[in-house]
Amino acid sequence: MSRKDREKLTDRINKTSYVFSRKVDSFEEAYPTIASLRVEVTESDLGFGRSPRTWPFTERNFQHAVNCSNPMCYGGGVEIGWMIHDMARNKETDREESKMCQGYEGSPKGRKRYRSCLHSFRIKVHVKYKEEGDSREQENTT
């Protein structure tokens, strides 16, 4: 198995079927109260020479998870969808968090686990909500 073939976080999420939820077709359907979203995810490798990588997201290109760029990492990355869901439920407008990669470094076929992945992710989120009237208009048109 080559380093590029190692399973990442989004691969695991796509294979999972959830008993009490379903996949939705659009950001609007998943988060009907959010008017606009700005997310910035910055991945760092704890000072091993590579410069940090940054991914910007909006409601137009939102992804539930960001994969780890470490070629030795299995199942790695960070979930950001849960964070947006939690913010929408609590009507939060801004949040910043740091998370370690969920994956691990292992043997080429993934049978041996060497150590947890050392990459980290800094997540910054800004949410703007729809006005109360906007939500009702949306409900009346559907």
Image (cartoon, helix red, strand yellow):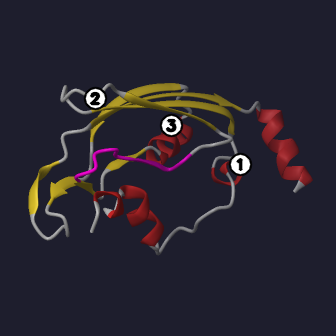
Helix, strand or loop at label 3? It is helix
Circles 2 and 3, Cβ within 8 Å, touching? The answer is: no
Q: Is residue 45 magenta?
A: no
Question: Which kind of residue does numbered mark 2 sit on?
Answer: Arg
Q: Nearer the viewer, residue 78 or 11?
A: 11
**Residue under circle 2?**
50
- Residue 92 in percent (x, y) is at 52, 29
Mark in the foreground, 2 or 1: 2
Mark in the foreground, 1 or 3: 1
**Residue under circle 3?**
87
Cα separation, mark 1 vs mark 3, equals: 15 Å
Quarter occupied by residue 101: top left
Q: Is residue 59 left or right of residue 47?
A: right
Q: State the mark number for residue 28.
A: 1
Q: Nearer the viewer, residue 39 or 47?
A: 47
Q: Which residues are magenta?
A: 63-72
- Residue 107 in percent (x, y) is at 14, 63
Helix, strand or loop at label 2? It is loop
Q: Earlier in the sequence, mark 2 or mark 3?
A: 2
**Quadrant into which the N terminus falls:** bottom left
Mark in the foreground, 2 or 3: 2
**Quadrant into which the C terminus falls:** bottom right
Q: Is residue 128 left or right of residue 46?
A: right
**In the rendered view, would you say 78 is above or below 93?**
below
Helix, strand or loop at label 1? It is helix
